Image (cartoon, rainbow, N blue to C red):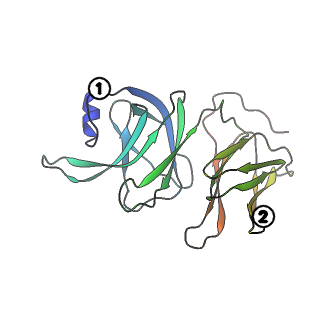
Amino acid sequence: MIGALAMVGCLPVAAQTERLVKARTLCFERVADSPDIHVLGEKDAYQILMPVEAFSNSFPCTLLDGEAVFYKKEGLDAGGEPKKVVVARARVADELKEVLFYFVPSGKKNGLLYDVRVLNDDLKSFPLGSSRVLNMSGTEVAFQLGEHVRKISPGKYAQVGDVTKRTELNMAPVVFKMLSNQGHWRTVAETKVRFTLRTRLFIVSYVHAETRQPLLKVYKDMPPRKEPVRTDP
């Protein structure tokens, strides 16, 4: 593995603890200056995808001292080798074995291009039929997913189980509320989503940077089956 470590030019090679996790990626929005991003895989550098509409396939990711380091290749060094420029870092808790790296543009002109949210991605912690809602709006929000209602602090997420109050087409409302200046909850975004026991949903609330309009992103996740799938009623 030392040869692979040496490829990451911004990192020291000596005495780092290595740990392998199973990872996937998803990107809120791509930064134009980062077309190709790499991370250490099981034996060598691995070029990752940055999908914005769907989850990537899983890949082995090597953590160095509990951290995944993502970099792009830019120009050549004095020896004619591509320079490695770190664009994002993600610290992974020791107990996590399967993770989702959710890339969000940092908005910084200098420094790391992305902030990375690390979420537990195994089916035991996030079972089929469940939904996660991540609040990126910068203020407390309230959510309704079918019969489930949750308040979520800024930067946090909530997870709910099966949505049982569905139409014959398995549709149910997703309602996003924010506090008004008078302190009342008001609906700022609403849609209908199909909920099934064969998929997981990842929903992100945010405020558009230019229009300041509250919006929702809804990602449908259908990971490879590892266990019998329950049957929808």
**Left or right of 233, for residue 120:** left
The correct choice, above or below, for 139 with respect to 226 in the image is below
Of 98 and 113, the residue lying toward us: 113
**Distance of label 2 from label 1 (alpha carbons):** 54 Å
Of 45 and 185, the residue lying toward us: 185
Asked if one can make out residue 112 in the rendered structure from this viewpoint, the answer is yes
Of 211 and 26, the residue lying toward us: 211
- Position of residue 228 measured from the top left corner of the image (x, y, whole percent): 71, 28
Q: Which mark is residue 15?
A: 1
Decide which of tag 2 and tag 1 comes sooner along the chain. Answer: 1
Which corner quadrant holds the N terminus?
top left
Residue drawn at point x = 44 percent, y = 48 percent: 49
Cβ atoms at labels 2 and 1 below 8 Å apart: no
The correct choice, above or below, for 73 with respect to 224 in the image is below
**Left or right of 184, for residue 139:** left
Q: Hey, which quadrant is residue 136 in on the image?
A: bottom right
Q: Hey, which quadrant is residue 111 in on the image?
A: bottom left
Outermost residue, front direction? 182
**Left or right of 92, for residue 121:** right
- Position of residue 42 measured from the top left corner of the image (x, y, whole percent): 38, 30
Say which element carries label 1. loop
- Position of residue 100 measured from the top left corner of the image (x, y, whole percent): 54, 41
Residue drawn at point x = 65 percent, y = 63 percent: 215
Say which element carries label 2. loop
Outermost residue, left direction? 79
Residue drawn at point x = 86 percent, y = 50 percent: 168
Q: Hey, which quadrant is residue 233 in on the image?
A: top right
Camera-nearest label, 2 or 1 = 2
Q: Amino acid at mark 1?
A: Ala
Residue drawn at point x = 34 percent, y = 30 percent: 43
- Position of residue 117 measured from the top left corner of the image (x, y, whole percent): 53, 45
Q: Which residue is the site of mark 2?
A: 183
